[in-house]
Amino acid sequence: MKIINCVGTRPNLVKISPIVREMQKHDEIKQLLLHTGQHYDETLSKSFFKDLSIPEPDYNLGVGSKYDIEQTSEIMSKFKNVLTKEQPDLVLVVGDVNSTLACALTAAKLHTPVAHVEAGLRSGNFRMQEEVNRVLTDRVSDYLFATTKDDVENLLSEGIRKEKVFLVGDVVVDALLHSVEKARESMVLQRLGLGKGDYCLLTMHRAENVDYNEVLSEIVGALGEIQSRIKIVYPMHPRARKMLRKFGFDKRMDRMKNLLVVEPQGYLDFMNLMSNSKCVITDSGGVQSETMILGVPCITIRNETEWLITVKHGTNVVVGTREDRITEETLRAIREPVKKAVLPKLWDGKTAERIVRILLENYRS
C-alpha cells in the first residue's frame, strides 16, 4: 500500500510523526513524506525531524509563505505532478492549514482516496481560513479520523456517511508520550535563565490577532500588565514579528523588562517550556490540546475555539482579545491551583496504531 503523508507546517510534523513511525512497522506499507514548504525554516525543521524521530521529506514543494489563495493554488499545481508520478493508493493529511486542503483537493480531483486526521473539529467561525480548510477537507475525504465524540457528531450532522467516520483519539498524545522523557532532558530553562513555574509562555501568530492594529494593541496592553506580575517568555513567530514592527508595538514591547522574546524553539525545547510554565497564553489550536495533556492552564486569546473539549475539561479559558479580560483570566490562572483534566476516551497514545490498522484492514478488503 503506497501512502503519501502530507505536511506543511511544524505543528503538522508533530501530528504526522506517530503515524509515520507506526507505518514504518508494517512491511506492506510504502510511505512517502511530502512537505509543501508552507512554513519551512531549514535549521528549525531539521531539529523537528530529529526531535520527532522521523525521516526528512521525500518531497519538498518549497512553496514558501504567500497569500492564502496563491499558496493553495501553487501547492495544488506542484502536488499534482507528484501524484501523477507516484500513483499512491492513499493521501493522508493532518490538521487544518492551507497545505491540508490543497493536498486533499488535488488528490480528490485525481480520484486518489484521502484520509484526514483531526476531522470534525469546528470553531463555527467561517471567517477563519482554518475553518474553511477543515470543512472542505472533510467533504472530500474518504477516511475521517476524529479526535473526540463531539467531532464525530459534527461530521454526522453535516451529512458525512457514518462508515467514513472513525473515532481514534488524538495523535498529539502519541507524540507527547513518545517524546516526554527526551523533553525533560532539554536544557532550555537553564539556557534562558528560567525556573519551573516562574513564567508564563506566550504563542501568538494568527492573522486575526496580529494583522489588526486595534486587536494587537489590546493584546500588547495585556502583556504589559501581566509581565509586571510574572515573567512572560515569547518564542516569536516571524509573522508576529513583522506586524509588531509594522504597527510600532515592537518598541513598546522592548520596554517591558519582564518580557523575554526568543526565537522559535524546537519541539523538545518547546515541550519543556510548556510543561514547566505557570500557564500558557496562546492563539494556537494545537497548544490548547497539548496544555490539557500536560496539565498546564491555558488562556486562549481568540473569540472561539475548535478545541471545545479543552474548555469542557476546565484546562482552557477562551478570553477573546480585550486587554482587561486577558489580564484578569491570566492572573487568575497563575493564582489558582491547576485543574487536573481527565483525558477523553482513546487519548491513550495508541491513536496512530488505530489509524494504520483501519487503513490496512480497508485496503486488504
Image (cartoon, rainbow, N blue to C red):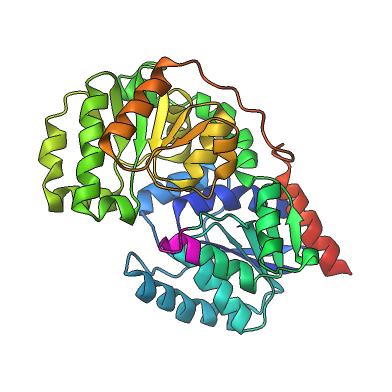
* Whether residue 40 is situated above or below residue 330 in the rendered picture: below
Q: Within the magenta stretch, is there residue 171?
A: no
Residue closest to the eye, 127 or 51: 127
Residue drawn where x is 52% and y is 56% of the image? 56
Question: Residue 192 at what x, y percent from top left?
Answer: 30, 24
Front residue of 95 and 207: 207
Quarter holding residue 85:
bottom right
**Image quadrant where one finds the N terminus:** bottom right
Measuring from the top left, give residue 141's x and y in whole percent. Answer: 66, 70
228 is higher (above) or lower (below) than 260:
above
Using the rendered image of the protein, determine whether residue 35 is visible from the camera's viewpoint.
no
- Residue 133: x and y in percent read 50, 66
Image: 102 above or below 280: below
Is 127 covered by the magenta stretch?
Answer: yes
On screen, residue 230 above or below 344: above
Residue 170 occupies which quadrant of the picture? top right
Q: Foreground residue, 161 or 9?
A: 161
